[in-house]
């Protein structure tokens, strides 16, 4: 699995600045001269903000990113074995899924139907959609490019609420179209979820959006290492004859 440094070293300048904004240190970050020093600055800030005052005094350099993700997961009551915690990339996605499933029941029926439609389950009876069922739908839709897309939708929705603007994704037209969901049903859910996090205290106002943004950067880095469809930009497996997202011949 990729290290935090590896992910950040392969991220765009714009994506790194978003992360610096979440640490409340954009101005200081912009004064750092080299890319390598900028990455080290971000990692130190993330680790520092991830630990409470006592932990920082004891450990000196704050806490490791893996521990920050586990702490966020525990705070959001993601169900996992703390004695044998799963991989960090798995927990990042579980955090996003948990924020969606927790807020689903608080939405009105019209909003719930739009969320289900975005997951390809528009005909499902709302009375039968429990948090467990919704989590199952999310899991069923999380494979390949769908993982990247959900991470992007979540990170974009959170950025809109915190920074007042969405993220940019260059020439990836399929992803750009998908982000319309961030201002629709999934955006509503994540916006409500973020407001709950925002009231939980200053530490989580930094760590939660940071973890969600890094989850996106991880998935973005992974997709750039795969062959991509020339039409929609979705990653394709070697030997595939047609794109699974848009049907274009490879």
Image (cartoon, grey):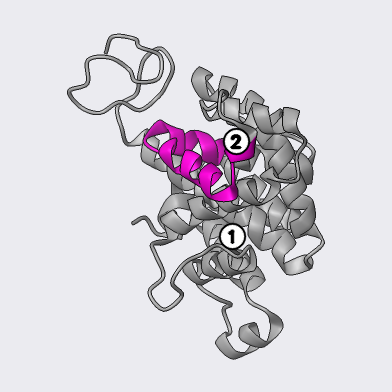
Q: Secondary structure at mark 2?
A: helix
Q: Residue at x 56, y 55 (%)?
A: 95
Q: In the rendered structure, does residue 15 fall within the stretch colored magenta?
A: no
Q: Residue at x 59, y 25 (%)?
A: 117
> Local crowd at mark 1 within 10 Å, few (<14), some, or many (≥20)?
many
Q: Quadrant of the N terminus?
A: bottom left
Residue 157 horizontal/vertical position (percent) = 68, 38
**Dominant secondary structure, magenta:** helix
Q: In the rendered structure, does residue 137 fall within the stretch colored magenta?
A: yes
Residue 4 horizontal/vertical position (percent) = 46, 59
Above-or-below relation of 123 to 79: above
Q: Is residue 25 left or right of residue 173?
A: right
Quick one: which residue is furthest to the right in this view?
199
Q: Which callout, 1 or 2, points at the residue further toward the start of the chain?
A: 1
Q: Secondary structure at mark 1?
A: helix
Above-or-below relation of 196 to 13: below
Q: Which residues are magenta?
A: 127-152
- Which residue does the numbered mark 1 point to in the structure image? 42
Q: Are marks 1 and 2 in contact (CB under 8 Å)?
A: no
Q: Quadrant of the C terminus?
A: top left
Q: CA distance from mark 1 to mark 2?
A: 23 Å
Residue 128 horizontal/vertical position (percent) = 58, 39
Quick one: which residue is furthest to the left in this view?
239
Q: Is residue 127 left or right of residue 217?
A: right
Q: Nearer the viewer, residue 220 or 196?
A: 196
Quick one: which residue is furthest to the bottom in this view?
58
Q: Nearer the viewer, residue 64 or 241?
A: 241
The tag on residue 153 is 2
């Amino acid at each position: 699995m990729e290290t935090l440094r590896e992910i950040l070293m392969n991220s765009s300048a714009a994506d790194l600045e978003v992360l610096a904004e979440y640490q409340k240190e954009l101005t200081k970050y912009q004064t750092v001269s080299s890319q390598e020093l900028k990455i080290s600055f971000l990692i130190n800030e993330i680790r520092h903000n991830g630990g409470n005052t006592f932990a920082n005094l004891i450990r000196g350099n704050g806490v490791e990113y893996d521990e920050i993700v586990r702490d966020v997961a525990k705070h959001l009551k993601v169900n996992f074995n703390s004695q044998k915690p799963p991989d960090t990339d798995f927990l990042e996605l579980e955090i996003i899924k948990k924020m969606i499933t927790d807020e689903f029941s608080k939405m009105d029926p019209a909003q719930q139907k739009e969320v289900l439609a975005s997951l390809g389950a528009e005909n499902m009876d709302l009375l039968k959609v429990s948090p467990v069922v919704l989590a199952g739908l999310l899991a069923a839709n999380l494979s390949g490019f769908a993982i990247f897309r959900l991470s992007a939708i979540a990170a974009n929705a959170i950025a809109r609420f915190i920074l007042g603007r969405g993220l940019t994704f260059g020439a990836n037209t399929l992803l750009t179209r998908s982000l319309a969901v961030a201002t629709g049903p999934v955006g509503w859910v994540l916006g409500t979820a973020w407001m709950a996090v925002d009231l939980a205290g200053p530490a989580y106002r930094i760590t939660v959006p940071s973890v969600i943004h890094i989850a996106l950067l991880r998935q973005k880095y992974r997709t750039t290492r795969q062959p991509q469809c020339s039409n929609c930009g979705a990653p394709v497996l070697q030997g595939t004859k047609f794109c699974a997202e848009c049907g274009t011949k490879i």
